Amino acid sequence: MIEPPSLERLIIEFSGFPGIGKKTARRLAYHVLSKSKEKAVAFSEALLDAVEKVRPCSKCFSYAEQSLCDICKKRSGASSLCVVEKTSDILPFESSGVFQGLYFVLGGVLSPLDGVGPEHLHIPYLIERVQKENIQEVILALGSSPEAESTVLLIDRLLKDMPVKRSRLARGIPMGSDLEFVDEMTMLRAFEGRVLF
Ligand SMILES: [Zn+2]
């Protein structure tokens, strides 16, 4: 089907979202245009607003509008730090209510094939945070892929000589599954059954 260039561009942009194929992208683009112009403009303004205002928290690299995110502000002084790969991985912890401590977003996991080395992750900031704050336990919640596994081993090695407990989630999270989609019950079990190094 031949679409006007601007509509075609919108479809291409939508198809860049995760899990959105060309068909769904087209449906979304048509939906936007079939709504009132005000609604479409409000949508684009919300998008721009979020892109302009949201930035990484200066302590944990999660999303924030100010220098610190809400969790770092409200739970400052907490003694447990949960290390996750990406910001959305915080969601199952918060929705299950299993964890009341602080988080740290690593920004990825080691992946030599994709050219991701330790220098691309926030590891030095993590070490600094553990040194400076009153952290008693670091929970490594990085999933179960081989890449996550080698990242856990590297961080464990770096923290080894520091006076801090190191633990990881219990097995039970399906191999290779994305932490952000883990259901509350599975998260609860994985967290409660976490094992010390
Ligand atoms: Zn934060």
Image (cartoon, helix red, strand yellow):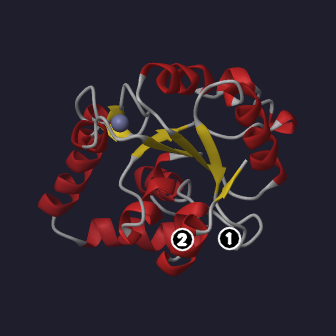
Query: Left or right of 26: which side holds 101?
Result: left
- Please state which amino acid type lies under the numbered disc 2: Met
- Please state which amino acid type lies under the numbered disc 1: Ile
Using the rendered image of the protein, determine whether residue 42 is visible from the camera's viewpoint: yes
Horizontal and vertical percent position of residue 169:
64, 60
Residue at mark 2: 187
Horizontal and vertical percent position of residue 152:
73, 42
> In the displayed image of the protein, which residue is found farthest to the front?
163
Residue at mark 1: 173
Residue at (63% x, 25% y) in the render: 162
Using the rendered image of the protein, determine whether residue 1 is visible from the camera's viewpoint: no
Crowd class of label 1 (few under 14; some 14 to 19; many from 20; radius 10 Å) = some
Residue at (38% x, 48% y) in the render: 101
Task: Say above or below: 98 vs 108.
Answer: below
**Depth check: 13 or 101 in front?**
101
Residue at (34% x, 32% y) in the render: 55
Contact between marks 1 and 2 (CB within 8 A): the answer is: yes
Location of ligand 1 given as a quarter of the image: top left
Question: What is the number of the mark on residue 89?
Answer: none
**Depth check: 22 or 137 in front?**
137
Under circle 2, the secondary element is helix
Horizontal and vertical percent position of residue 46:
22, 49
Mark 2 CB within 8 Å of ligand 1: no
Under circle 1, the secondary element is loop
